């Protein structure tokens, strides 16, 4: 693959700009694939050269890690394996979850993740959300202990502010910050993305396709099953989806001019936010996977970036 790899934060590893978010293969979204197909997709991704897989203990819960574990058997050394800790599902039907950042829970959860993934060491271990009941430095200290114990290689954190990042990095370096970044979610561009660049950390953009919306696949007529996480999100209510079509229409126009798909333009814009930015789109389809990986080869012109920067803000909050 001719796409240039990007450094994974302070780690002595580089990865392709586009990795694979595995969540949707067993959780959150309507599934067209069964478990065997999910395993097959991950294996095909690795064979294509995808070298960064993202999961979490809460996805499923637990089943997504097991799926990834089975998929990487015999291929483990070809990927940077990232998982997360700190969220606990409280109600499956409504996706309500709590946060648990107690050091003892972190240590116990890590052992569970290692077992499900079938590995001796997790490459990138993220704190999924900060638990307001526990000082984040304490949680992070427990995670640093896992690095010292050889169970984890590098640490990351999801949805943290610069103040929180400063606090944890005094305890142990931050290799990656994973937060939402896409054409319709730009909150972290002002402070956190520049902080990562200055500190030599990677910024890993989750939901870079706006949970599928920015690809143009979702219209006001789309009906989500009640088990689909998007049914709980304000931006995916029918009225908001109808309003937000004006964002997709403009992405589609630009994509047409470039001979690319809207998904590829959305990913190319994310990757244009800095050489330290990585994207982990999720998909259940090989065709989309290939398309997403190829998006790393699309270099947008300054005019195209300005055009995308000027897209209207979305209607509806992200959670
Ligand atoms: N840290 C966190 O708190 C957090 C939160 C959310 C997600 N994440 C991570 O980020 C990863 C990606 O996020 P996400 O899955 O929420 O959203 P996403 O990557 O923005 O969007 C995924 C959706 O886009 C569709 N899609 C993918 N490629 C496409 C293409 N080329 N053309 C048309 N449609 C396409 C997928 O459809 P199909 O499934 O039908 O292929 C799926 O519905 C997750 O897997 C997870 O690892 C982390």
Image: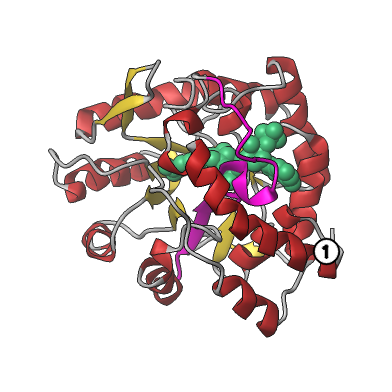
The picture places residue 296, in percent across and down from the top left corner, at: 73, 62
- Beta carbon at label 1 within 8 Å of ligand 1: no
Q: Nearer the viewer, residue 250 or 209?
A: 250
Residue at image position (45%, 71%) is: 200
The picture places residue 50, in percent across and down from the top left corner, at: 73, 47
Q: Is residue 85 above or below residue 111?
A: below
Q: Quadrant of residue 220?
A: top right
Q: Quadrant of the N terminus?
A: bottom right
Q: Is residue 108 left or right of residue 203?
A: left
The picture places residue 69, in percent across and down from the top left corner, at: 60, 25
Q: Is residue 224 visible?
A: yes
Residue at image position (51%, 58%) is: 184
Residue at image position (52%, 55%) is: 205
Q: Quadrant of residue 106?
A: top left
Q: Nearer the viewer, residue 288 or 117?
A: 288
Q: Is residue 174 above or below residue 74?
A: below
Determine which residue is flagged by label 1: 256
| Magenta stretch encompasses residue 213 | yes
Q: Is residue 75 visible?
A: no
Q: Quadrant of residue 166?
A: bottom left
Mark 1 burial class by Cα count in 10 Å: few <14, some 14-19, many 20+: few
The magenta-colored residue range is 200-225
Q: Quadrant of the C terminus?
A: top left
SS of the residue under disc 1: helix
Which quadrant of the render holds ligand 1? top right
């Amino acid at each position: 693959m001719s796409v240039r790899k990007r450094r994974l934060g302070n780690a002595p590893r580089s990865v392709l700009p586009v990795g694979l978010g595995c969540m949707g293969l067993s959780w959150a979204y309507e599934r067209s694939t069964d478990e065997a197909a999910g395993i097959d997709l991950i294996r095909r991704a690795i064979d294509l050269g995808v070298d960064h897989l993202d999961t979490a203990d809460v996805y499923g819960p637990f089943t997504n890690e097991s799926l990834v574990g089975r998929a990487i058997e015999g291929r483990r050394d070809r990927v940077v394996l990232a998982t997360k800790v700190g969220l606990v599902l409280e109600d499956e039907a409504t996706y309500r979850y709590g946060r648990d950042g107690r050091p003892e829970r972190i240590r116990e959860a890590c052992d569970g993740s290692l077992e499900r993934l079938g590995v001796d060491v997790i490459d990138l271990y993220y704190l999924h959300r900060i638990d307001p009941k526990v000082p984040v430095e304490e949680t992070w200290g427990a995670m640093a202990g896992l690095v010292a114990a050889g169970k984890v290689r590098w640490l990351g954190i999801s949805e943290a502010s610069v103040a929180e990042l400063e606090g944890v990095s005094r305890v142990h370096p931050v290799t990656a910050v994973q937060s939402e970044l896409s054409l319709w979610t730009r909150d972290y561009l002002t402070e956190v993305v520049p902080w990562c660049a200055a500190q030599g950390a990677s910024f890993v953009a989750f939901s870079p396709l706006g949970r599928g919306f920015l690809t143009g696949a979702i219209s006001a007529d789309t009906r989500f099953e009640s088990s689909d996480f998007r049914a709980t999100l304000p931006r995916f209510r029918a009225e908001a989806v109808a309003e937000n079509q004006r964002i997709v229409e403009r992405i589609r126009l630009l994509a047409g001019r470039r001979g690319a798909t809207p998904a590829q333009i959305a990913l190319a814009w994310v990757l244009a936010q800095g050489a330290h930015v990585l994207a982990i789109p999720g998909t259940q389809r090989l065709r989309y996977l290939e398309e997403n990986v190829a998006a790393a080869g699309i270099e947008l012109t300054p005019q195209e970036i300005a055009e995308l920067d000027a897209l209207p803000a979305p209607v509806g909050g992200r959670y």
